Image (tube, rainbow, N blue to C red):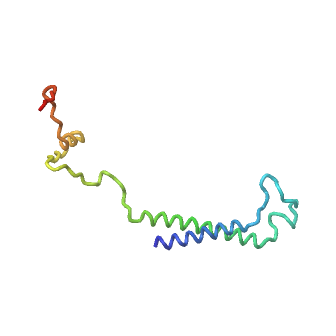
Amino acid sequence: MQTVLIVVHLMVVLALIGVVLIQRSEGGGLGIGGGGGGGAGGGFFSARGTANALTRATAILAGLFFLTSLSLTMVAGWGRGPATIFNTPTTLPSGAPAPAPGGTVLDQLQGAQPAPAAPSGPQVPQSQ
């Protein structure tokens, strides 16, 4: 399922790039280019059927792009459960006593890890 969505997504992306590159530039940025003062020949609502078809195709392909992107996101996270540390069982080292229920976290940590023995005095190296 995911492979099919990826292939469809890539085809939509390539078609969208192609349609955008085919469109004719309006030249309206910063008042550059243009000519024509709004008459019937060069105005915004002129009889350019191909431009209208390309605009519609761009809108449809953009909608398909969003749909396939959202679908791929949902499929990627389909079998994944919530990641939490609170629902996982804890494993104690062998020989460690089980913590008493109702104790604090500090009590549980101290019960699971044995305290190191304190040295009785300074250690003197012995030569052999």
Relative image position of residue 127 (x, y in whole percent): 13, 30
Relative image position of residue 56 (x, y in whole percent): 69, 70
Please tell me whether residue 99 is drawn above or below residue 6 in the rendered image.
above
For the C terminus, the quadrant is: top left
Residue drawn 87% across the image and 67% down it: 41
Comparing 125 with 35, the one in front is 125
Residue drawn 17% across the image and 40% down it: 114
Residue drawn 81% across the image and 53% down it: 31
Task: Examine the image and state in which quarter residue 126 appears.
Answer: top left
Name the residue furthest top.
122
**Horizontal side of residue 12 vs 23, given as left or right:** left
Relative image position of residue 34 (x, y in whole percent): 84, 59
Relative image position of residue 14 (x, y in whole percent): 62, 69
Task: Examine the image and state in which quarter residue 60 appears.
Answer: bottom right
Comparing 95 with 74, the one in front is 95
**Horizontal side of residue 25 vs 17, given as left or right:** right
